[in-house]
Image: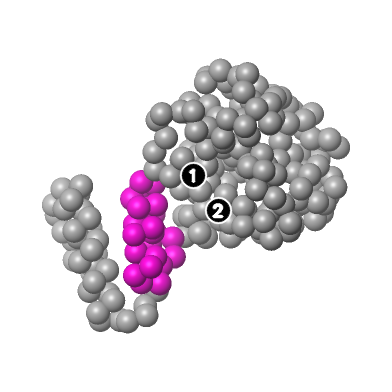
C-alpha cells in the first residue's frame, strides 16, 4: 500500500444507505463523463452484486463477470459436454437434469442463461422447471423455504417441481449424496465456496445416477484450497 500509486481511502468500509449512495454517485459520474461507457462490476459480495446489477443494468451498460461471465462460460461448457455425449448420453437438452451445489450469484447467472437456452431449444415451462435444481448449505432451494435471500427465490423449485424430481420426501438437511440419488441429475456443477464437497461418494452417486454413467461434472471454484475436488 505504501508504494501504490492509487489513492487509498483509509476509512471503514461503507455499509447500508451510505454504500448505496456512494454507488449511485459513482454511476451518475461515469454516465455524465463517459456516456455509453460499459461498467464492469467485479468481485462484489453476492447480495451487492445482484442488487447493483439489477438496479443499474437499465441505466448504464452493465456487465458483472461473476454473474454473467460465469454464466456464459458455464453454458458453453455444458453445451459442449452434452454435444460430446456427456450427461445423459443422448446429446439432447431435454434429457438432462442439472444439479447446482451452491445457490449464489454464480449459480443465478448460469441458471438465467441456461433457462433461456433450454427455452430456445423447445423445452416447455414445466420441463425447464424440473431440469434445474439448486442446493445450498440448508438443502434443496424450494419455494416452501422462508429463508431465501439474495436472488435464491429465483432459483427455487415449486412444490410441483420438487415432487416431480423426487425430492419432496427428503428432509431439509439431506446430504449431497442423498439429493443426487433421489433426483438423478445428469450434470453436477459446483458453484459454492465449500472445499471438498465433491467427495468420492458424491461423484460415484452422480455417475450411478446418469443413465449411461457419463455424468458431466463441473467444478467452478478456485483456488485449490476452496475447490470441491482436485482432479489429477
Q: Is residue 55 magenta?
A: yes
Q: Is residue 187 magenta?
A: no
For the N terminus, the quadrant is bottom left
Residue 180 occupies quadrant: top right
| Residue occupying image coordinates x 39% and y 46% | 46
Q: Is residue 186 left or right of residue 68?
A: right
Magenta residues (range)? 41-64
197 versus 125 height, above or below: above
| Residue occupying image coordinates x 15% and y 48% | 12
Name the residue beneath numbered marker 1.
154
Q: Is residue 60 left or right of residue 159?
A: left
| Residue 224 % position (x, y) | 53, 41
Residue 39 occupies quadrant: bottom left
| Residue 207 % position (x, y) | 77, 32
- Per the model, the C-alpha gap separating discs 1 and 2 is 9 Å
Q: Please report contact status of discs 1 and 2: CB closer than 8 Å, yes or no.
A: yes
Label 2 Cα neighbours within 10 Å, binned few <14 / some 14-19 / many ≥20: some
| Residue occupying image coordinates x 24% and y 61% | 23
Task: Provide the secondary structure element on which disc 2 rests.
Answer: helix
For the C terminus, the quadrant is top right
Task: Provide the secondary structure element on which disc 1 rests.
Answer: helix
Label 1 Cα neighbours within 10 Å, binned few <14 / some 14-19 / many ≥20: some
Q: Is residue 221 visible?
A: no
| Residue occupying image coordinates x 34% and y 70% | 59
Amino acid at each position: 500500500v505504501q508504494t501504490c500509486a492509487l489513492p487509498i481511502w483509509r476509512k471503514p468500509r461503507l455499509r447500508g444507505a451510505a454504500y448505496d449512495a456512494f454507488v449511485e454517485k459513482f454511476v451518475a459520474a461515469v454516465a455524465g463523463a463517459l456516456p455509453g461507457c460499459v461498467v464492469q462490476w467485479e468481485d462484489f459480495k453476492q447480495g451487492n452484486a445482484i442488487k447493483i446489477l439489477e438496479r443499474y443494468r437499465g441505466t448504464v451498460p452493465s456487465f458483472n463477470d461473476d454473474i454473467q461471465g460465469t454464466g456464459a462460460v458455464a453454458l458453453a461448457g455444458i453445451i459442449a459436454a452434452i454435444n460430446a455425449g456427456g450427461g445423459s448420453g443422448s446429446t439432447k437438452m431435454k434429457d438432462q437434469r442439472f444439479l447446482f451445489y451452491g445457490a449464489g450469484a454464480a449459480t443465478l447467472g448460469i441458471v438465467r442463461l441456461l433457462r433461456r437456452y433450454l427455452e430456445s431449444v423447445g423445452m416447455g415451462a414445466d420441463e425447464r422447471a424440473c431440469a434445474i435444481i439448486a442446493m445450498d448449505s440448508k438443502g434443496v432451494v424450494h419455494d416452501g423455504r422462508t429463508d431465501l435471500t439474495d436472488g435464491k427465490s429465483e432459483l427455487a423449485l415449486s412444490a410441483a417441481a420438487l415432487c416431480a424430481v423426487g425430492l419432496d420426501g427428503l428432509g431439509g438437511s439431506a446430504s449431497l449424496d442423498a439429493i443426487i440419488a433421489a433426483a438423478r441429475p445428469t450434470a453436477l456443477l459446483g458453484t459454492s465456496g465449500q472445499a471438498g464437497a465433491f467427495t468420492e461418494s458424491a461423484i460415484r452417486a452422480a455417475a450411478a445416477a446418469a443413465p449411461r454413467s457419463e455424468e458431466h461434472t463441473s467444478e467452478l471454484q478456485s483456488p485449490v484450497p476452496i475447490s470441491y475436488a482436485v482432479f489429477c
